[in-house]
Image: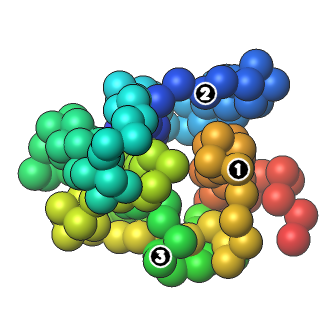
Amino acid sequence: MKTTFLLTGKTDKEYLRQGMQRYQERISHYIPFQTKILPDVKRNIKRTENEHKKMEGIILLKSIVPSDVLVLFDEQGKEYSSLKFAGFVQNFMISGVKHLVLAIGGPYGFSEDVMKRANFKVSLSKMTFPHQLVRLIILEQIYRAFSIIRGEPYHHG
């Protein structure tokens, strides 16, 4: 199963980029994995949040194909423990999904069109995290999921 992690805009902080690189390399030992950075829509005071989300949504939707399974990380999604998230990921592998796309939206979230296209929505927590830190957290959880699936000792809980 090929997996793509879609991000809107570059990661600004070096320490986050280093951590992300570390987990991307680890994940790549398990599956074909890539991170794709979508162009950032520049903020404009004349543009509403919904208009901004719609523009980002157009870019995101152009980067996937109908057969892709799209999972959004969104506060409205379903919460999982790490063990349950591993099962969630493993179900895609078992069911023969060819391309899994995991996406994080921009600072305002996802457009209505992207939300409608999504196959699944996952919430990390009811807590609010810095937008770019979430990228590292999700990569760590993807790596953890594969270590759980493989029965490796990384996950001790």
In contact (CB < 8 Å): disc 1 and disc 2: no
Label placed on residue 130? 1
Mark 1 packing: few (<14 Cα in 10 Å), some, or many (20+)? Answer: few
Q: Is residue 27 left or right of residue 39?
A: right
Q: Which residue is mark 3?
A: 77
- Of mark 2 and mark 3, the one earlier in the sequence is 2
Residue at 67% x, 73% y: name it.
125
Picture quadrant where residue 132 is located: top right
Quadrant housing the C terminus:
bottom right
Residue 149: in sight, yes or no? Answer: yes
- Work out whether residue 11 or residue 29 is closer to the camera in this orientation and state it: 11
Q: Amino acid at mark 1?
A: Pro
List x then y, in percent, for residue 89.
Answer: 48, 62
List x then y, in percent, for residue 120.
Answer: 35, 70
Label placed on residue 40? none
Residue 100 higher or lower than 114, as above or below:
above
Farthest residue in the front direction?
A: 46
List x then y, in percent, for residue 59.
Answer: 23, 37
Residue at 61% x, 27% y: name it.
11
Residue 83: in sight, yes or no? Answer: no
Mark 2 packing: few (<14 Cα in 10 Å), some, or many (20+)? Answer: some
